[in-house]
Image (spheres, rainbow, N blue to C red):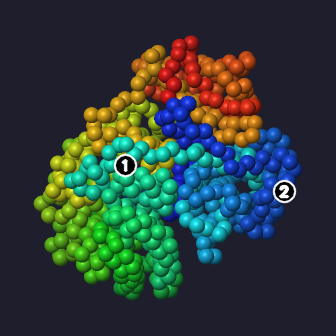
Amino acid sequence: MRALARLAVTTLLVAAPLTAVTAAASAVADPTPITVLTSDFEDGTVQGWAGRSAETLAPSTTVAHGGTGSLSVSGRTATWQGPSLDVLDTFVKGTAYTISVWVRTASGSDNARLSVERRTGGVAAYDQVAGNTAVTSGGWTNLTGRYTLATDVEFLRIYVETASTTGAFFIDDVTASYVPALPIQTDIPSVKDVVTEFPVGAAITGAETVTEHGQLLAKHFASVTPGNALKWDATEPSENTFTYTQADPLIAWAKAHGTAVRGHTLVWHNQTPAWVFLGADGQPMTATAEDKELLLGRLENHIRNVAGHYGDDIGVWDVVNEVIDESQADGMRRSTWFTVTGLDYIRTAFRVAREVLPAATLCINDYNTNVAAKRDALFALVSQLRTEGVPVDCVGHQMHINVSWPSVADTRAMLQKFVPLGVEQQITEMDVSIYTGSGESFPAPPADRLLQQAYVYRDMFALFREFAGEITSVTLWGLADDNTWLDTFPVTRKDAPLLFDTVLQAKSAYWGVVDPSKIEQTPPGTSGCAVTYRVTGSWTGGFQGEVKVANTGTTAWTGWTLTWAFTGGQTVTQLWNGTVAQSGTAVTVTNTSWNGAVAGGGSATAGFLGSWTGGNPAPTAFTVNGTACTVL
């Protein structure tokens, strides 16, 4: 991949921290989240939470996010120490849970993380749910992410830790909830049955092989790529100690379903343990003959073990990944691999892989190969290696792109460039971000961006089919929008880059691949507005909600007032990103000073807490600035 995407095999991770995941479903049809865990610390106890070591946990009324109580965590002597809660009997394998915790330091500031520890056969593994998030003593910060347990375990606890300091901190209002899974659509064509010019695959973690995710994967895709489970840190974390606990279940699933496997990746400058680059003296390697010999020996040993472990079960390998840096005069990335060995690590990797896997397709894989300078540097390298007899069979184009870049012409030039070399070409990690820059962030995917995305998929797959004689595989970097590395890269925000949405339903992007005549734009509201209402958490007598107002017209709003009526006796008790007034069943929300301007095609979102008795039906009618809106 282009950048680190540490998605553990047993986890399904969404942007962390992030706002609640949204999907384009109607307010009536959208499943209501079911809360399985709540810790509010209002009863003066620790409510089952315990320290991970000898730290002190105690109920506190010093500060609180909601109510008057919170949980104090003090006496820490290491950053990994913090509060943890047993969820072994709470979480069900194959269910995607949204976990939320509010954190506040007692003094100073740090970064906090929300994670899960699991153990199988006494072996511990750690899955990050919400990554480093700035927390201070000046207010509460929310850590939120999604987690899916995909394997049987004997130990399962959620926990909070910090990145740098060991000071005291507080947590409060911890919740875990899930949205009841929607059945996958069985009455739509399978991608693999429609696109027959080359196999279409998806990158997966363990979460994609169970329940509805597994059904979706089996229906639509002809190949799979373990996104992280075959990388060096997952397979050889310490020298000559090999483990395949992450990858073996994925390969077994593929074999059971008759699905091909792409191996990713044998050599990369990222996700390689630090020990690999330490010399015999324990110091960082330099360009000495001794260090070069040691490093190439480690490389050969790694490939012989990992590739040999799977043999013919994996027919294609990304042997080396991301070796090009077009800003260098020679076009080569200055990784430790290169600074110690020059091109010999690439030569060695391909030579050993061919010896171990004589029938496999061996690829060199990189990103931004549609950029002329990057493309030309990769072409020069592959030309040189093949002239030397290095068995480079295939060039992999990652194709991490967005709704406005690159052009079809640039992509065609990329593919055409390598035709004279006689190598196979594969699209290895494709996704289409809805964002065109790091400064954008949408609470939910705008209809116009989803439409643009559908046309990009349409045009790119049409181009790939033009090159069907050259392209031997197309892989999407993920199964559905609920698990994408783009939620945290290049910034944290919810992205929607794949063919299926967060509840595994086909998007316009899917139709762009399968049948472009069925691409449809979300109908605009009759008055230029649309509203999405979602319950994002629920507990006895209370709930958390989110409402988004979208300007579907072309004239910008300078301010907005949203109204609706509750029909189940609900009451809004707190609202953020707006001001609220409620009279009986009627609710009125107006913008704040900073989110009143909404351009055509833009949107604004408010979140709220509410109480309810007896039922919690979604409102069915909304107005913005006095005019009725479409309900999405």
The part of the image, by quadrant, that contains residue 258 is bottom left
Q: Are marks 2 and 1 in contact (CB under 8 Å)?
A: no
Q: Residue at x 51, y 25 (%)?
A: 631
Vertically, is 106 above or below 600? below
Q: Quadrant of residue 507?
A: top left
Give x and y (percent) for residue 607: 63, 33
Q: Is residue 485 left or right of residue 129?
A: left
x 56%, y 30%: residue: 28
Q: CA distance from mark 2 to mark 1?
A: 46 Å
- Say what amino acid the circle numbered 2 marks: Ala
In the image, what residue occupies the spot 76% across and 64% down? 51
Q: Is residue 123 visible to us here?
A: yes
Where does the image place residue 510, in percent across and percent down from the top left?
35, 42
**Vertical side of 278 occupied by 364: above or below:** above
Q: In the rendered view, would you say 294 is above or below 177?
A: below
Say which quarter of the image contains residue 625. Answer: top right
Q: Residue furthest front?
A: 187
Q: With 19 as the anchor, is 417 left or right in this view?
A: left
Please report the residue visible at 47 percent of the width from the left and 69 percent of the height from the top.
249
Looking at the image, tell me whether mark 2 or mark 1 is earlier in sequence order. 2
- Where the N terminus falls, by quadrant? bottom left
Judging by the rendered image, the residue that carries numbered circle 1 is 431
- Which residue position is annotated with label 2? 58
